[in-house]
Amino acid sequence: MFLSLEVDPVAEEFTLAPMRRLLRKHGNLRISDGAAEELRMVVGDYGSKVAEAAVAIALEEGRRTVLGRDVRAATERFKGSEVEA
């Protein structure tokens, strides 16, 4: 099990309830606290990496506003490759 005792500051932005709902949407199973917490950590980590890349794209283009296309482009960078923790 990959459950960490320390909570990533970015992961704290997400509550466990939506993580449980997301897991439950893919199968009406019981969801353990550990599963919801682990998904929260994964979502927080991935989201942080995408956000960092999106901000970098906006700055590279000389903008002070992150646009939807920046987030899409940042997401494309990670498709097909595993995001390192």
Image (cartoon, grey):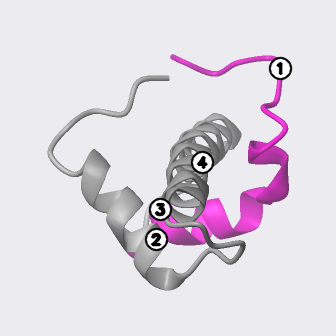
Residue behind mark 1 = 6
Between discs 2 and 3, the one toward the N terminus: 3
- The numbered disc on residue 52 is 4
Q: Which residue lies furthest to the left in this view?
A: 80
Q: Nearer the viewer, residue 10 or 18?
A: 10
- What is the distance, in whole Å, between disc 2 and disc 1 at their CAs? 30 Å
* 10 Å crowding of disc 2: few (<14), some (14-19), many (20+): some
Q: What element carries label 3?
A: helix
Query: In the picture, residue 55 is in which quadrant?
Result: bottom right
Determine which of the numbered discs, if any, sits on residue 15 in the image. none
Disc with the residue nearer the chain's start (1 vs 3): 1
Cα separation, mark 4 vs mark 2, equals 10 Å
Magenta residues span 1-25
* Pair 2/1: label in front: 2
Relative to 22, is 54 above or below? above
Return the disc, 4 or 1, that comes first in the chain's sequence: 1
Report the residue marked by disc 2: 70
Taking the image as shown, residue 75 lies to the left or right of residue 60, namely left
Q: Which one is nearer the viewer's eye here, 72 or 84?
A: 72
- Mark 3 → mark 4, Cα distance in angstroms: 26 Å
Q: Are discs 2 and 1 less than 8 Å apart at CB?
A: no
